[in-house]
Amino acid sequence: MTRRLQVDVKQKSFNGRAIIHDVTFDVAAGEIVAVLGASGCGKSTLLRAIAGLDRDYIGSVSIHGAHDNTIGVVYQEPRLMPWLTVAQNITFGLLSNNKNTNIDGLLHEVMLESAREYLPKQLSGGMAQRVAIARALVREPDVLLMDEPFSSLDVLTRRSLHALTREVTAKHQTATVIVTHDVEEAVNLASRVLVLTKRDNHGATIQHDIRPSQSTTSRHEMIDAIIESLEQSQPQHAI
Amino acid sequence: MNAIASTTNVSHEEIKIRPAFALPQSAYGFLLPLALLIIWEAVSRFGLIAQHLLPPPSALAETTLALARDGSLFTHIGVSSARVAAGFAIGAALGLIIGAVVALNRTASALLDPSLQALRAVPSLAWVPLLLLWLGIDLAPKLTLIAIGTFFPMYLATLSSLKNIDRKLVEVGVQFGFTPSQLLRKIYLPASLPGIITGLRASLGLGWMFLVAAELIAATSGLGYLLTDGRETGRADLVLVAIIALALLGKASDSLLVALERRVLHWRDVADIQESHK
C-alpha cells in the first residue's frame, strides 16, 4: 500500500497555549484512520491543520496523491448551501471548467438518486450527511477528512453511514481520517485508532496507536480498554 | 375497546366549535376597511361631522370617477410612480453596491462607514432646503431626496446581512479553495439575499414617504401635489383620494417585492409562527 497522507504536526499553539504536541502518523490509500479523543482535546484543531484551513503550526502535512493533492472534508454539520438542490450542492466545489464529473454516479453511490432535486430543508440528517460526503468526493480527492460527521445521527443511520464511509474509501482509494469521540465508532470503522490525550501544558499527543482486530470479542475488549484509559487521563475537573 | 374508551372520554373543551360559514383567510384583510367605510358613510350622512371636512365614501367615489374621467388621476399616479421608481432605483442600487463594498473591504469600511453613519443620523427631510437651493424645484431635487431616503435602509440591510453569514458555510468555500470573487458569487450573495430583500422592502416603503415629502414642497403634478391642491382649495375629498391612492400604490408595490421574495427565497426553511400558535 502506498502512503497517501503524512501528518507530522510538531507543535500547534493558540494564544501561547500548546494544543497539539508531536502528532505523527500516516495513512495509506484506501485506509481509514480514526483519531479518538475526549471533547476539547484538540482533535478538530488537528483536522483543520490537515485540511489546510489552519496553517499556523510547526510541522508538515504532505499528500502524495495521484491527482492534484486535493482534500475532501465532511464536517460535523452537513453545511449544505440551503439555496441549492442536492445535485447542485454535490457539484458545489467544482469550478466551471470541470463540470463533466459523473454526478449520477455519485448520487447512486450515496443512494440519493431520487432526492436529486430536493432542497436541504427537505432532507433528514442522514440524507444531508450523505450529500456532504458526495460533495467531498466530487473532486476525486486523495484525502477524505471527517470531523465527527455522524455524532448527531441515530444508531441505525450511523451504521449505514459507516458502511458508506468504508465503501467510498475503498472505491475512491482515499486516505480517510475520521475524528470522533465515539470509541465504538473508531474501533468498528477504522483499521487504525489513534487515541489522543491531553497532557496538562504540553497539548494533546498520541497516547495509543491501536490496530483493531477482526474478531468482535477482542474489539469489545479493546473498546473497554480505551474507555478506561480515557477515563484515567481525563483531568478531574473535566468530568 | 381502548379506542372506544378514548373517544367517549373526550372532554367538552377539546371539541372545537366551528362557525357556520368561514371566510377565506385572504378576505380577512378587507373586513376592517369595510366596517370603517360603513361607519364613515353613516357618520358623514347623518351630519355628525361636516361633509366638507369628512366627505362620505360615496362622495369620494364620485371625486375619483371625475378625476379618472378627465385623466388627471392617472397622470398623478403615473408621475408619482415614475418618481418613486427612479429615486428608489438610484438609492437602492447605491445602497446595495456601497453596502457590499463596505461589508467586504476593510479599508472601505474604515473610510466610508463612519461618515455614512453620521449622515444617516441626519433626518432625511433636513436635506430639503439644501436640495431646493442647489437643484431648483424640478425633478432633480425630488429624485435626490427619494434616493437619499431609500439609500440608507438598503445600505444598512446589505451591510448587516453580508456581515452575518454563517462562518461554517464560508469555510466550505475556503476549503474548496474558492477565490474571493467565487466566495462572493457562490456563498456571500445567495446567503445574504433574505436580508437584502427585506432591505428592499423597507427602502421602497421609505421611497413613497419621501415622494410625498418632495411633492408637498414643490410640484405641479403627482399625488403629493393633489394633497396640497386639496388643502389649498379646501377640498378634503381630493386629499382623501390622494391618501387612498398612496395606500393602494404602496401596498401594490410592496406586494410585488413579496412575490419576488417568495420566488427567490423558496429554499428558506422558516417556521410558520402563525401555524404553530393556532
Image (cartoon, helix red, strand yellow):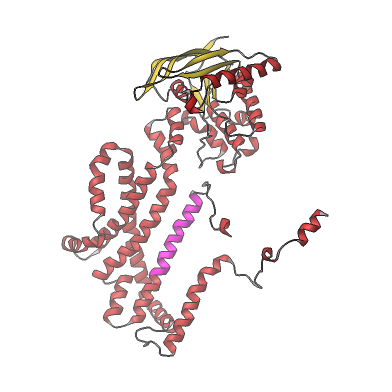
Counting from the top left corner in percent of width and height, residue B31 is at: 52, 73
Task: Please tell me whether the stretch drawn in magenta is mainly helix, strand or loop.
Answer: helix
Q: How many marks?
A: 0
The relative height of residue A107 versus residue A212 in the rendered view (above or below) is: below
The magenta segment is: B246-264
Counting from the top left corner in percent of width and height, residue B75 is at: 35, 71
Residue that extends furthest to the top in the rendered view of this protein: A1
The relative height of residue B27 versus residue A4 in the rendered view (above or below) is: below
Residue that extends furthest to the front in the rendered view of this protein: A236
What residue is drawn where x is 42% and y is 51%?
B197
Quarter of the view holding residue B84:
bottom left
Counting from the top left corner in percent of width and height, residue B45 is at: 44, 89
- Identify which residue, B168 or B2, lies in the foreground: B2
- Identify which residue, B80 or B31, lies in the foreground: B31
Please say whether residue A23 is visible from this viewpoint: yes
- Identify which residue, B2 or B273, lies in the foreground: B2
Q: Is residue B252 magenta?
A: yes
Q: In the rendered view, does B31 fall on the left or right side of B100?
A: right
